[in-house]
Amino acid sequence: MGAVALAPTTVLASPTKQAEAVADKLHAPAEGSAEREAILDGLRRHWQASEGKRYRGRISFHVRYLKAHNSWVWVYADPRSSIATEGFPENSGFLLHSEAGRWEVMKLPPMDDNGDGAFNPSPADLKRISKMYPSVPTDIIPVEKRR
């Protein structure tokens, strides 16, 4: 009878199950992760179609805030083009939702209670967002403590 060599193996959990577990909790998708890249691709599509203007350069983002929970994301990201002469208008926070595996920027209700709009949503703004999108987890939205 010959010798049998056994090689150690590692069993990993399903990536899908791991992603589902993370999606059920408030989290910040890691820089370079597939989830973060998919979210930024959704934001990139928004800017590419913005006001009918087509940006010719590659759009990248300086992300200042990004929180995800249950297929919803709130992000503050400054767009930048690889073509230095292409500028972007001022922007604020964006709400994105994943439907059928594709992230899309969602329309926000008017948010002007405190003059900061989507930069700093007020409690009344949060109520309007929740009314418009009942499934959005409001823990993704940054809210400064108010006096």
Image (cartoon, helix red, strand yellow):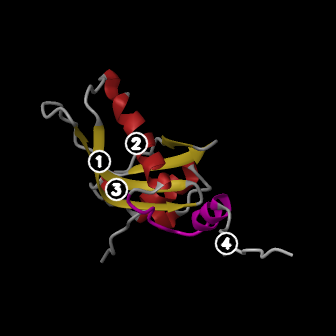
- Asked if the residues shown at circle 4 and circle 2 are in contact, with their CB atoms under 8 angstroms apart, the answer is no
The image quadrant that residue 134 belongs to is bottom right
Q: State the CA–CA distance, disc 4 to disc 2.
A: 40 Å
Report how far apart the C-alphas of labels 2 and 3 lie in the structure. 25 Å
Q: Distance between the residues labelled 3 and 4?
A: 58 Å
Magenta stretch holds residue 25: yes
**Which residue has dot 1 on it?**
61
Residue found 33% across the figure and 54% down from its top: 76
For marks 3 and 1, the one nearer the N-term is 1
Cα distance, mark 1 to mark 2?
9 Å
Amino acid beneath label 1: Phe
Residue 12 screen position, x and y as percent: 65, 68
Mark 1 or mark 2: whose residue is earlier in sequence: 2
Mark 1–mark 2 contact, CB under 8 Å?
yes
Q: Determine whether the residue tagged by mark 2 lies in a helix, strand or loop.
A: helix
Residue with the mark numbered 2: 43
Residue 25 in the image: above or below residue 86 = below
Label 2 or label 3, whichever comes before in sequence order: 2
Q: Any mark on residue 113, and which?
A: 3
Where, quadrant-wise, is the C terminus in this rendering? bottom left
**CA–CA distance in space, label 3 to label 1:** 28 Å
Instruction: Please identify the residue farthest to the left as the structure is shown.
Output: 85
